[in-house]
């Protein structure tokens, strides 16, 4: 028995499918461009890479993935479980404070960490001056630091998704587990955790994809990963073909992982219970409770307070001259781009999610819309640029000529293309919370609504959307913040004059002037806080 | 409730979006005279004042996008003859050489440019011209190193600097060009020995920026390093008490040892696709002239290409230097080879 009968909703379904396919096409076009790079041979570069670096790069990348994967899972799940299910001092505060670090871009976290903890930074200088030469002579640019930096900025993905999963799990289930003799730990490992698994896996895979595709953060530590080879081929050897070939290997790896993850989830689905209003928490021993408070404070200190304080002190040192009209223009651009992109991306992700729920043969195709997130930003940006220029050159410019207009690129350098780049890149981010939200809606609910005569639009509007509200908000917040932080596509595809805060940060850090990047970085963090706070307030009612 | 909020949010955002689109719609070309489009990998802060002066003087307006050279070049190539770009500004001869190789730049014949830009700092065919000089040389901790101990880039590979050298990452094009200049001056084998010696002498793993190299020397992590002079000038402008000295490498000696300091350029070229070549050429000529040269020199503490312009007062304290006369385009030609060499000896 399928939950969605095909009759009566024909036109709507086809519209849904049409929009969905269009969105998928948008994602696949640049990816196709990148995969097509295999049409030419780049033996020279490949031989060189294999002979010198590739092995080490792969080992580094793998270490990073394993390290980040483990630590974001542990941090995200533990913190979510603490704040949702346990009573400890400051719980209500930490519940939302712990989301704040996600407003800190990874590259900002990296340069702040290095600025503060490195050999020449204030901490080690202080130790050398006051305690002894031997105590402040550590080169912190190690594997471990890179993993810690990534984990501190990426754990909120897991935390937010796990938290909303734990929140929407009915207390009944946990209570039932308790009645059946489970203690708190058993209830967690045997009931709550397996039920939250789709959400957690969605969060962890977002974090891992971001790690895999990152270049800016690892570059600050001069830590070489697979993306280093991509950028070396492109910026060093000026060989975009070889860079695209390397990038497509990255893509294949991610596609396989996503596929395996979906297979392992199989047909199982976990639906939420009926009673949401009742909420119970474990009471924990005072010592344990204070330990939880300590852990939460430590994470918050390292992931949010320290970077913000360091940024503020740099910004103050750099003076107020930067706070000119131009600065507010940048801020306005960042906000409006992120807002528009969040709306469009969430809408499209919703369309795709409904499409996949239809369980038609097309659902694998709709799933491929997630791949945009797995590519390094610059490579995806070039793929998008190439495919849109193709449309410009092949169709729109001949059309302009036909009508006697001066030929000029229409799409590349337009707002539309930049927005397209954003949703192509961030559909995966929006899909995670939406799909895990959708999965937890028990099929009997829409079925009951159907029996009561609701169909099509009414079903979506009155059942799905209200029930998906937490998921929708999470998705919108994630995309908003990600777009604000996004750099390579914004740089390459922005219309003239549409400079954003991220562009300013790039310009300053590219000249090594991190202090001057502090104010825009701080503004980015502050602006990223707005949607986080809105979503927190919303999730309270 | 939620939908009312959502609806209002949508309305506001669409209004903002539309207003923003409307505001940025470019005015028609013919009504206000030509307008140049510049793709630049020099950042806004370093080009806008120069553009503003140019517009004031000539009435020709300029729009620009900034990005790294790689993506900008890819975009110019893809746009082909339809590219709106009239000019490419970028740093490092390697990037300029590559742009010329890819055929996106047009040759420009100009007596003014020939007079203002020395032959070693421009393309033989006139496809690109240097607009500012960046010297990459040795800096040292002035309390731990005597300038007499220093001599050449090659010498930094010798035993005496073991565990005392700091370098920026090999991924930065400045170092790739420097190594390319070693290949030209010393031949491949000797150059590889030198670079390998540098790596053996490193005090710590290479840094991600020149600033970090200077900071590391200041903090006592190492004693000598190789940086572009303007990074030090900027830091000295903020903190004149910094105990970092600057040494002009390869000034004395016979042959390769006395070839002079490795210099690189930031430069510009007119694009093949430009529909306003005359105006673009005018901009290029203007950038090599005294007003713009002064701006280039003072905005970023670089050296002017035009001898008629003095460097900024701050960097005049380092005195004058003789520069390596290797045609700067060679650095572009040998960039790939330099990277492979650095990879082979484990210079990250």
Image (cartoon, helix red, strand yellow):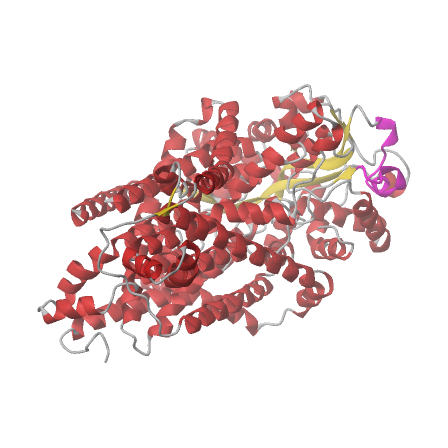
Choose between B189 and A187: the one closer to the eye: A187
Is A144 placed left or right of A251 in the picture? right
Looking at the image, is A468 positioned above or below residue B282? below
Q: Quadrant of residue A88?
A: top left
Magenta-colored stretch includes residue B158 = yes
Is B191 placed left or right of A69 in the picture? right
Q: Quadrant of the C terminus of chain A?
A: top left
Is B140 placed left or right of A279 in the picture? right
Residue A129 in the image: x percent, y percent?
A: 70, 23
Q: Residue visible at 75% across and 24% down?
A: B319
Residue A393 visible in the picture: no
Choose between A266 and B236: the one closer to the eye: A266
Q: Quadrant of the N terminus of chain A?
A: bottom left
Looking at the image, is A31 positioned above or below residue B332? below
Q: How many marks?
A: 0
Is A3 placed left or right of B312 in the picture? left
Residue B328 in the image: x percent, y percent?
A: 71, 46
Q: Residue furthest right?
A: B254
Residue B83 visible in the picture: yes
Q: Residue furthest left?
A: A453
Choose between A539 and A532: the one closer to the eye: A539
Looking at the image, is B160 positioned above or below residue A368? above
Magenta-colored stretch includes residue A194 = no
Residue B180 in the image: x percent, y percent?
A: 75, 50
Q: Quadrant of residue B209?
A: top right
Q: Residue visible at 39% across and 58% down?
A: A187
Looking at the image, is A47 positioned above or below residue B235? below
Choose between B280 and A527: the one closer to the eye: A527
Q: In the image, which residues are magenta?
A: B146-164
Q: Residue visible at 40% across and 49% down?
A: A80
């Amino acid at each position: 028995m399928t939950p969605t009968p095909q009759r009566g909703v024909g036109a709507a379904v086809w519209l849904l499918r049409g929009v969905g396919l269009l969105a998928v096409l948008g994602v696949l076009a640049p990816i196709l461009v990148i995969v097509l790079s295999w049409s030419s041979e780049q033996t020279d570069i490949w031989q060189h890479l294999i002979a010198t670096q590739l092995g080490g790069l792969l080992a580094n990348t793998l270490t990073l993935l394993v390290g980040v994967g483990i630590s974001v899972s542990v941090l995200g799940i533990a913190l979510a479980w603490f704040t949702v299910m346990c009573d400890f001092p400051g719980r209500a505060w930490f519940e939302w404070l712990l989301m704040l670090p996600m407003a800190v871009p990874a590259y900002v976290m990296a340069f702040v960490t290095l600025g503060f903890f490195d050999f020449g930074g204030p901490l080690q200088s202080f130790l050398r001056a006051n305690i002894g030469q031997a105590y402040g002579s550590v080169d912190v640019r190690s594997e471990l630091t890179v993993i810690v930096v990534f984990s501190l900025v990426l754990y909120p993905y897991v935390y937010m998704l796990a938290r909303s999963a734990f929140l929407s799990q009915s207390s009944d289930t946990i209570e039932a587990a308790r009645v059946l003799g489970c203690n708190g730990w058993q209830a967690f490992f045997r009931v709550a955790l397996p039920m939250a698994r789709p959400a957690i896996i969605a969060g962890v895979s977002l974090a891992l994809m971001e790690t895999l595709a990152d270049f800016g953060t690892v570059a600050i530590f001069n830590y070489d990963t697979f993306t280093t080879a991509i950028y070396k081929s492109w910026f060093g050897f000026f060989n975009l073909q070889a860079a695209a070939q390397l990038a497509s290997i990255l893509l294949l790896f991610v596609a396989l992982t996503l596929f395996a993850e979906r297979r392992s989830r199989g047909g199982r689905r976990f639906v939420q219970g009926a009673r949401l209003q009742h909420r119970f928490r474990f009471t924990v021993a005072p010592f344990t409770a204070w330990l939880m408070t300590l852990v939460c404070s430590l994470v918050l200190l390292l992931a949010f307070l320290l970077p913000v304080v360091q940024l503020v002190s740099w910004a103050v040192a750099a003076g107020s001259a930067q706070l000119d009209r131009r600065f507010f223009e940048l801020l306005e651009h960042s906000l409006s781009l992120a807002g528009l992109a969040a709306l469009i991306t969430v809408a499209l992700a919703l369309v795709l999610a409904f499409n996949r729920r239809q369980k038609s043969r097309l659902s694998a195709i709709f799933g491929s819309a997630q791949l945009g997130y797995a590519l390094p930003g610059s490579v995806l940006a070039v793929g998008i640029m190439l495919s849109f220029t193709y449309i410009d050159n092949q169709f729109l410019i001949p059309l302009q000529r036909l009508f006697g207009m001066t030929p000029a690129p229409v799409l590349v350098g337009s707002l539309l293309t930049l927005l397209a780049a954003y949703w192509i890149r961030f559909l995966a981010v929006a899909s995670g919370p939406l799909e895990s939200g959708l999965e937890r809606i028990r099929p009997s609910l829409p079925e009951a609504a159907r029996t009561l005569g609701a169909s099509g639009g009414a079903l979506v509007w009155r059942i799905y959307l209200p029930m998906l509200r937490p998921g929708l908000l999470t998705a919108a917040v994630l995309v908003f913040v990600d777009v604000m932080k996004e750099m390579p596509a914004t740089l390459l595809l922005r219309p003239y004059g549409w400079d954003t805060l991220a562009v300013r940060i790039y310009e300053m850090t590219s000249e090594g002037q991190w202090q001057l990047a502090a104010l825009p970085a701080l503004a980015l963090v502050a602006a990223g806080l707005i949607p986080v706070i809105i979503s927190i307030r919303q999730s309270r009612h | 409730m939620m939908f009312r909020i959502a609806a209002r949010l949508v309305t506001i955002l669409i209004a903002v979006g539309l207003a923003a689109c409307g505001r940025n719609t470019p005015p028609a070309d013919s009504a206000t005279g030509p307008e140049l489009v510049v793709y630049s990998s020099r950042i806004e802060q370093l080009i806008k004042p120069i553009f503003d002066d140019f517009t004031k003087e000539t009435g020709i307006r300029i729009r620009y996008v900034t990005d790294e050279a790689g993506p900008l070049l890819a975009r110019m190539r893809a746009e082909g003859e339809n590219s709106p770009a009239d000019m490419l500004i970028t740093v490092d001869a390697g990037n300029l050489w590559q742009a010329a190789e890819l055929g996106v730049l047009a040759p420009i014949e100009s007596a003014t440019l020939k007079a203002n830009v020395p032959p070693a700092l421009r393309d033989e065919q006139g496809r690109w011209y240097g607009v500012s000089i960046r010297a990459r040389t040795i800096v040292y901790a002035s309390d731990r190193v005597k300038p007499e101990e220093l001599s050449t880039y090659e010498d930094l590979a010798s035993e005496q600097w073991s565990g005392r050298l700091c370098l920026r990452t090999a991924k930065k094009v400045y170092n790739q060009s420097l190594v390319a200049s070693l290949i030209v001056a010393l031949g491949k084998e000797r150059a590889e020995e030198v670079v390998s010696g540098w790596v053996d002498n490193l005090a710590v793993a290479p840094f991600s920026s020149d600033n970090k190299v200077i900071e590391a020397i200041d903090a006592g992590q190492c004693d000598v390093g190789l940086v572009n002079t303007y990074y030090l000038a900027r830091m000295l402008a903020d903190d004149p008490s910094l105990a970092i000295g600057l040494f002009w490498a390869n000034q004395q000696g016979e042959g390769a040892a006395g070839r002079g300091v490795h210099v690189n350029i930031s430069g510009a070229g007119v694009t093949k696709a430009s529909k306003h070549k005359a105006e673009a050429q005018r901009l290029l000529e203007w950038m090599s002239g005294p007003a713009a040269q002064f701006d280039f020199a003072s905005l970023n503490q670089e050296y002017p290409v035009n001898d008629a312009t003095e460097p900024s007062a701050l960097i005049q304290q380092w005195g004058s230097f003789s520069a390596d006369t290797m045609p700067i385009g060679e650095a572009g030609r040998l960039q790939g080879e330099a990277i492979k060499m650095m990879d082979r000896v484990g210079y990250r």
